[in-house]
Amino acid sequence: RKGNEAKQRETHSEEGGRLLFSKGRPENSNTAVEAQAGSEGESRMAESTSVAKEACVEQKKNKASGFDFYNQLGAPKHVVAPMVNQSELPFRMLCRRYGADLCYTPMIHAGLCCRKKGHIWDVFHTAEGDDPLIAQFCANNTEQFIQSARMIEDQVQGVDLNLGCPQGIARRGHYGAFLLEEFSLLKEMVTTAHLHLNVPVTCKIRKLPKPEDTMALAHLLQNAGCQILTVHGRTRDEINQKIGDCDFGIIRRIKQELKIPVFSNGGIESFGDIDKCLKETGADAVMVSEAILEDPSLFSGKTYDPCDIADEYLQLVDKYPSMKAEFCVRPHLYKMMYKELRYYTDLRDEWCHAPADVLRKGPQEIRERRAKNNSADAKKILAMPTWYRRHRTAAAEKKRREEQKRKKLLVERKKEKEEEEARGDEETLLQRFFDNSSDESEDE
């Protein structure tokens, strides 16, 4: 393992020089950092959080805040979102080549960093050129959030608190979007981080069901010390097939009322959607997640062959080797070549359990299959739904089936009604017949 770690920490640059792969793990091992984080964290937690003390600490650390921090980051407009097991180092470096101004790390579990020795170095990697970079943490405990963030704060430009993850694992772990209603805890976590970390603190949230609650949360986070607020314009329930349109209106309202930079998240499928979003929300930047997983060149505004992009990604995985990167290869390739794999289903099934060497040959195999295709096959591939649209397509199909079922039911009810009316007419005729017959008998 030590040999693998050494290999991870140092590799060769394209110019032939040596570059630091993981700027994180100190020479003396992670023990020193974690011990320091623990001892200093405990003592710092006891400090006063008064306004005067806050100003003193702020001045002492000379941290940039609000738009000063935003400008130090280069006034980014195109931001790669934090994505679990997906916004790792090779993928970030790929996105930077195609116009990403700012990237976030995958979500780092603060509790695991504190409980499991060395965990931070298994999940966090950076390198020369991987900046500006913000590290995102999930946490529901203030001390764990501070201690884990302090392990890497000297290698990132900021630390983000995840308050937007809507997945089941976040529900079970009680973090992400399932902390949104816990205003007291959030105020404590953000204020303490703002006071005791050497880098600015940012937050990423989802909207709450009631607009007034969302606005109250946004103001609370700003007042607690959040320096950039990213807002996803959907609630935590609007995921998968329940996904709806992104609410740009609430993001616009937050941007109008807050004094710190606001990033818009959600509703971006193509490069053309970026300007539309910025105009409708007034946001300072657009953060993209799902769409950029399928097209890492999205911010360039140009169209590239996904096989070429996939090959470029694999080269970066080789340049920045780690167990984390190897784990991410399969899902990345699947998303980048989603349409092709929807068409070549045998290849998709093969990739599910294929070893790394087979996966690396995948882009070339798709090229070879394309060469054998006719124009009709190419049109079918082009017409395949995108990765971004997968849930929306499934939801639309479900809605279509429900509509067909509803129409069928209406036709059946109409038919039953007509048959009932027909039976009623027949009974009426028969009744009249018998009534007439009875009248004739009485006359006789």
Image (tube, rainbow, N blue to C red):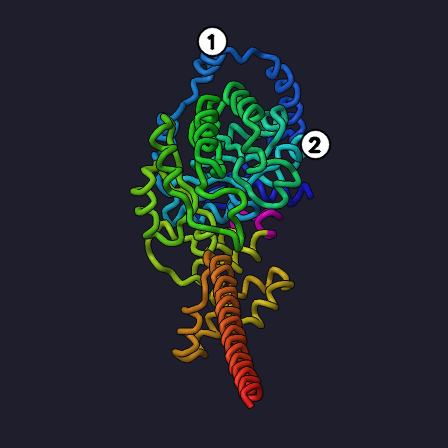
Residue at the extreme front: 444
- Location of the C terminus by quadrant is bottom right
Tell me how many marks there are: 2
Q: Position of residue 288 (x, y in %)?
A: 43, 46
Q: Which mark is residue 115?
A: 2
Q: Position of residue 392 (x, y in %)?
A: 47, 58
Residue at the extreme bottom: 444
The three-letter amino acid code for the residue at tag 1 is Ala
Question: Which element is circle 1 on?
Answer: helix
In the rendered image, residue 320 lying in the magenta stretch gets the answer: yes
In the rendered image, residue 435 lying in the magenta stretch gets the answer: no
Q: Position of residue 310 (x, y in %)?
A: 47, 59
Q: Which mark is residue 196?
A: none
The three-letter amino acid code for the residue at tag 2 is Arg
Which of the two discs, 1 and 2, labels the residue nearer the N terminus? 1
Question: Which element is circle 2 on?
Answer: helix
Closer to the camera: disc 1 or disc 2? Answer: 1
The dominant secondary structure in magenta is helix
Badge 2: residue crowd in 10 Å (few <14, some 14–19, many ≥20): few
- Location of the N terminus by quadrant is top right
- Is residue 200 shown to the viewer in this render? no
Residue at 59% x, 28% y: name it.
Answer: 145
Residue designated by label 1: 52
Badge 1: residue crowd in 10 Å (few <14, some 14–19, many ≥20): few
**Which residue is nearer to you in this view: 353 or 127?**
353
**Which residue is nearer to you in this view: 241 or 94?**
241
Residue at 49% x, 72% y: name it.
Answer: 414
Q: Tell me where the magenta segment starts and ends, as one range.
A: 319-327
Q: Is residue 344 above or below residue 293?
A: below
